[in-house]
Amino acid sequence: MKRAETERPLGAKIPPQNLESEQIILGAALLGKDIPEHLLPEYFYRESHKKILRAIREIQSSGVEVDMAVVCNYLAEHNELEEVGGAAYIAALTSVPPIHFDLMSHVNIIINKFALRHIIQSANEVTVLSYDEQFDRNMILAKWQRDLNDLMGIFTSGIATNSDGDFESLMSRLSARDTHLECINETMGGLHDGDIIIVAGRPSMGKTSLTMGFLNQTAFEDDLPVMYFGPQVTREKIISRLLSATCQVRLTDLRRGKVTKEERASLQKVHEKIVNSKNINLVAMPETMSAMRVAGEIRALAKKLEEKDQKLGLVIIENLQQLTWPEKLSSRKDEIDAIHGCLKPLAMDIHIPIVISAQINREVEKRENKRPLPSDIKDSGGIEELADATLLLYRPAYYHEGEPADENGWAEAEIDGYKGGPPGVLKSQFNAFYPSWRDMPE
């Protein structure tokens, strides 16, 4: 949906703006002060000020030192000098900044005024669309959500926040959620609040088994609620997987009821622990599911838990490819950007890690080296670049029958962990009988 299609006058009121702060910033730049890169020309209210800052940015990018004469010459060459008020106005700007002033306070004033104008414009457009009645409510809400995501991006672009100096609060924010695998805890720091973590692999590579391990650790070892979104998931399926992995009973035997007396006793003990826990919250995903609905479900549960003085510990979403965006966008990349823009602020706001599993393209099967790369994620839309961490699963036995396994079915496996740099190859083991992962024995 193009913005021009829904623009309407905002009324007789003058939109929020502060021309004095704009003049102070421009004057400081003309006097050689460094202006933060995240302050963009479009954040200014007056068109002439936008053109002046744009000229300053262009001059800086060419490596030339900025001063009044250089800026005037640039604007004259682009037939914009008179439009901005002429050389006299440029000169006058250099006398605006006070001798002592806080540059960042004026930068934040300009950004805040732009944000308010953005909110007014977005609300105006949503109002017009709602009165029109021909648009679906989910599409209108999706557009509004994207506008709000864009707005949140402005506030997280280089704006410093004051530290409260509370050491315990700092340590709490820095601490991560442990997983059941020490190789992930030690190498990648576990699962951090506010992070989006992608777990990717080919079908039957062990994605669900790994996320089930995360669920088990958080729900039962850490005693924190977990929200699990799974395709056509049932509580019985989740419980059977947890029982199989925890008690090391073959999943096929468990589902067919072929268990020994000793195994039954062990299964019953673990089953009581699971069913008595209120920490597993399941949502069955249809063939496709709107990321906005997912976010709404997460926020609703987090609020409900907060009323009981509890905290949501982890969210798991099975299958990135099933996540959609209600608004029709031009490409999967735009859709993924919108999905990430919806889930990432939510993860940061309610302080939880969100783990999303994803399929790997079958093209990897055609390569001699079948270890996946982040770019192999199916219909990723560039999610591997947006995610805070990516875990790629690889098992030699998946491609080579007869790969050695011990008497209990454990075979060598790898988890390639990407987190803002080169991968860390995490050596581990996988058991296909009662699908689960464990650290490589020493």
Image (cartoon, grey):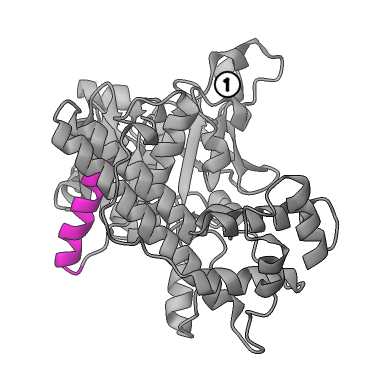
* Residue found at the far bottom of this picture: 100
Quarter of the picture holding the N terminus: top left
Q: Residue at x 32, y 60 (%)?
A: 350
Q: Is residue 359 above or below residue 366?
A: below
Count of numbered circles in the view: 1
Q: Is residue 431 above or below residue 198?
A: above
Mark 1 sits on what residue?
A: 397
Name the main secondary structure of what is drawn in magenta. Answer: helix
**x%, y% of residue 178?**
45, 57
* Residue found at the far right of this picture: 64
Is residue 306 magenta-colored? yes
Q: Of 94 and 157, which appears nearest the observer?
A: 94
Which residues make up the magenta segment? 294-309
**x%, y% of residue 66?**
80, 64
Q: Of 87 and 327, which appears nearest the observer?
A: 87
The image quadrant that residue 223 belongs to is bottom left
The residue carrying pointer 1 sits among few (fewer than 14), some (14 to 19) or many (20 or more) residues within 10 Å by Cα, namely some
Is residue 99 magenta-colored? no
The image quadrant that residue 400 belongs to is top right
Q: Residue at x 37, y 45 (%)?
A: 147
**x%, y% of residue 157?**
54, 59
Q: Of 304 and 148, which appears nearest the observer?
A: 148
Q: Residue at x 22, y 65 (%)?
A: 310
Inspect this view and state whether residue 297 appears.
yes
SS at mark 1 in the image: helix
Q: Of 79 and 165, which appears nearest the observer?
A: 79
**x%, y% of residue 7?**
33, 39
Which amino acid type is marked by label 1?
Ala
Inspect this view and state whether residue 210 appears.
no
Q: Is residue 233 left or right of residue 435?
A: left
